[in-house]
Amino acid sequence: MDENIYIGLLCLDFEEAKNFYITNLGFEIKYSHYQSPSGEIPRAILVHTITKNLELEFMTPKTPQEVNRISITGGSINLFTLPTHNIDSLKEKLENTKFFVSYIEAPYASFLTLEDPMGNKICLYERAQINQSKENFNFYHGDTLQENFFHSSLSVQNKLLHFQ
């Protein structure tokens, strides 16, 4: 069974998209080519350096409807989340840019929400170092970090919907 996660993002400017994800979000190029004389469709596939099983593929829109979905609120997808190990430095680097949307700290994780050049929302999260007893962290919604992350992701998404 393939355990990789594949996300396709529509974009018009492959270089801008690649640079954003490589420079800011810890991706590296897995595969990239541009339109050749034989008419091949341009493709760029990036892999996330932390998770290794997450791949982004930048795709050229094929219809006018797909073109219209780029660079508008929401982009071609609504929101996806990525883990990070340096959320504080990313926040500092991006909080005064056009990409910054919001930053939320919770007892179990911090969440930095960005908007990429195509208008897609990305929620970066970094788990807190939990050195206290489990009882202190069950107050939010669930017994596990994953349950708390799920509920906080919904909270972040709801805040984003009200923010727009």
Image (spheres, rainbow, N blue to C red):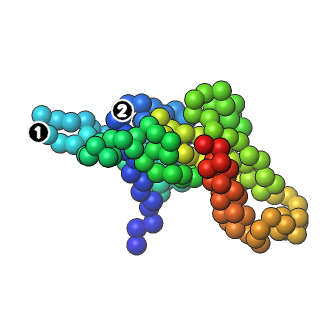
Which residue is label 1 attached to?
Answer: 38
Picture residue at 50% right of the left edge, 42% below the top? 73
Query: In the visual, does 86 lie left or right of 75?
Result: right
- 36 to 153, vertically: above or below: above
- Taking depth in this image into account, of 154 and 164 the one nearest to the observer is 164
Q: Residue furthest top?
A: 96
How far across and how far down the image is residue 112, in percent? 66, 43
Q: How many marks?
A: 2
Query: In the visual, does 141 lie left or right of 164?
Result: right
How packed mark 1 is, by other alpha carbons closer than 10 Å (few <14, some 14-19, many 20 or more), is: few
| Quarter that holds the C terminus | top right
Picture residue at 46% right of the left edge, 44% below the top? 75
Q: Earlier in the sequence, mark 2 or mark 1?
A: 2
Tell me the kind of residue under disc 2.
Asp
How far across and how far down the image is residue 100, in percent? 62, 35
Tell me the kind of residue under disc 1.
Ser
| Quarter that holds the N terminus | bottom left
Element type where label 2 sits in the image:
loop
Q: Residue furthest left?
A: 38
Q: Which of the 4 quarters of the picture holds residue 17?
A: top left
Query: In the visual, does 140 lie left or right of 125?
Result: right
Alpha-carbon span between mark 2 and mark 1: 21 Å
Which disc number belongs to residue 13? 2
- 65 to 17, vertically: above or below: below
Picture residue at 66% right of the left edge, 63% below the top? 150
Which disc number belongs to residue 122? none
Element type where label 1 sits in the image:
loop
Q: Can residue 72 be seen in the rendering of this structure?
A: yes
Picture residue at 45% right of the left edge, 59% below the top? 5
